[in-house]
Amino acid sequence: MYWQKDQECLPRPELLKLQLERLTRTLCRVANNVPFYRNKFSELNLHPEKMRSLEELRDYPFTTKQDLRDNYPYGLFAVPLRDVVRVHSSSGTTGMATVVGYSRNDIVTWSDLVARILCGAGVTPDDVIQIAFGYGLFTGGFGLHYGAERLGASVIPISSGNTKRQIQIMQDFKSTALVCTPSYALKMADVMMDMGINPNGLSLRYGLFGAEPWSEAMRQEINSRLGIRATDNYGLSEIMGPGVAGECQECNGLHINEDHFLVEVLDPDTLEPVAPGEVGELVLTTLTKEAFPVIRYRTRDLTRLITEPCPCGRTLVRMSRIMGRSDDMLIIKGVNVFPTQIEAVLFDIEGTEPHYRLIVERENNQDKLTVLVEVVESIFFDEMKKQKALVETIKKRLASELGIGVEIKLVEERSLERFEGKGARVIDKRQL
């Protein structure tokens, strides 16, 4: 099922022509309206009005998250604030927050692209969609909300948390589609079991999940335990939010909405394109955004392109589910965590050594982060009361810094492995 069949099934030659037209227009707009891009293009002697092929985009500079932070809050906007009808932002837990804006047309486009994802997953105007993503500055809740309304479905904007009430609403309102993180879907299944509720007695048929990495095995478990068809979708606030890509009912990769986003997959070391099917870093350029266009944004997400035709008939290229990151960022419980954040906290606490190890596991379908911390000999062999006090101090400081709870285990001085080169500080045991 399609939402915009003409665009979703556009013959590739016509799609490439459309991309070139929109890319040229976007590059000219940012050169005229965004000093950051104007200066970059001038330094490199680039003239977007002379662009003749999509391959010429490789001459243009990347945009990074740091660029967004350096231009906080409105430095990369391409329209006056009076033309911005919505502002979203990152939480800023890993540094200066990043801010993005949407014009009225951007909201219409965003809604249509999310409606495409919903349609592709099988959702229709007859469905009742329970959105259990958080609403607010995070793009997930509002993005899916407006897309579902655009589709014509009935929306339950329950937001996240309060699982028993989620299930009660699901029963009373006869929700047919669930939108949340995949780990939260499994938590719901656990709570249903505790409450003695058989998911087969509910009206649920579809689940649209995203915002965290998950595996095919996890999909099968969700399908089995909730009796639904689970599909993956992808988006990021810097580009648009949800609606960048999503699975159809074939569940064999996420169709990228290429008429609105130009995709590159590059070797993260050489920054040269990898061959189709090879894993590389996803780089995206917006083609139609008015308020906040972005050129060659380095997502740091690792994926591969799937160019074989999809039985669904869409001609849009597919990408595999996200396979990891090209930087050292971890996504734990849906929160971005950098080891350097933890390191900075430990450095600031007396008695800890600058050596630590992070162990990420998944227990009962929930992420768990344990931090092994070397401490000086006098503390490790000190009385238990002092050790407990130190553990509590580290826990509180890290919870405040990261926004999630972690487990702390103190280990003896010089007990953790040392590395001559780049240290392997993270052991991720999750089966993704």
Image (cartoon, helix red, strand yellow):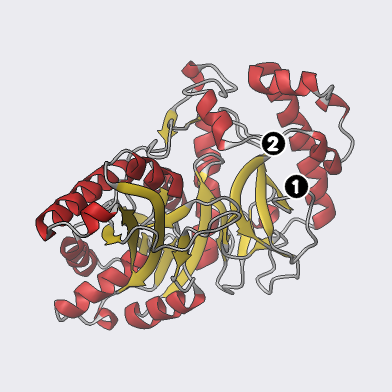
Local crowd size for mark 2, using a 10 Å CA cut-off: few (<14), some (14–19), many (≥20): some
Please determine whether, in this image, residue 131 is positioned above or below residue 25: below
Q: Nearer the viewer, residue 109 or 262?
A: 262
Please determine whether, in this image, residue 187 is positioned above or below residue 381: below
Q: Nearer the viewer, residue 366 or 175?
A: 366
Q: Which residue is mark 1?
A: 271
Q: Which residue is mark 2?
A: 62
Q: Position of residue 274 (x, y in %)?
A: 78, 58
Q: Position of residue 126 (x, y in %)?
A: 39, 63
The reply, left or right, for residue 177 in relation to residue 163 is right
Q: Are marks 1 and 2 in contact (CB under 8 Å)?
A: yes
The reply, left or right, for residue 383 in relation to residue 35 is left
| Quadrant position of residue 46 | top right
Q: Residue at x 53, y 52 (%)?
A: 328
Please determine whether, in this image, residue 218 is positioned above or below residue 272: below
Q: Earlier in the sequence, mark 1 or mark 2?
A: 2
Question: Tag 2: residue type?
Answer: Phe
- Answer yes or no: is residue 129 visible: no
- Answer yes or no: is residue 272 visible: yes
The reply, left or right, for residue 324 in relation to residue 87 is right
Judged from the image, the secondary structure of the residue bearing numbered disc 1 is: loop
- The tally of labels here is 2
| Quadrant position of residue 189 | bottom left
Question: Tag 1: residue type?
Answer: Leu
Q: Nearer the viewer, residue 123 or 424?
A: 424
Q: Nearer the viewer, residue 405 or 23?
A: 405
Q: CA distance from mark 1 to mark 2?
A: 10 Å
Q: Residue at x 50, y 76 (%)?
A: 216
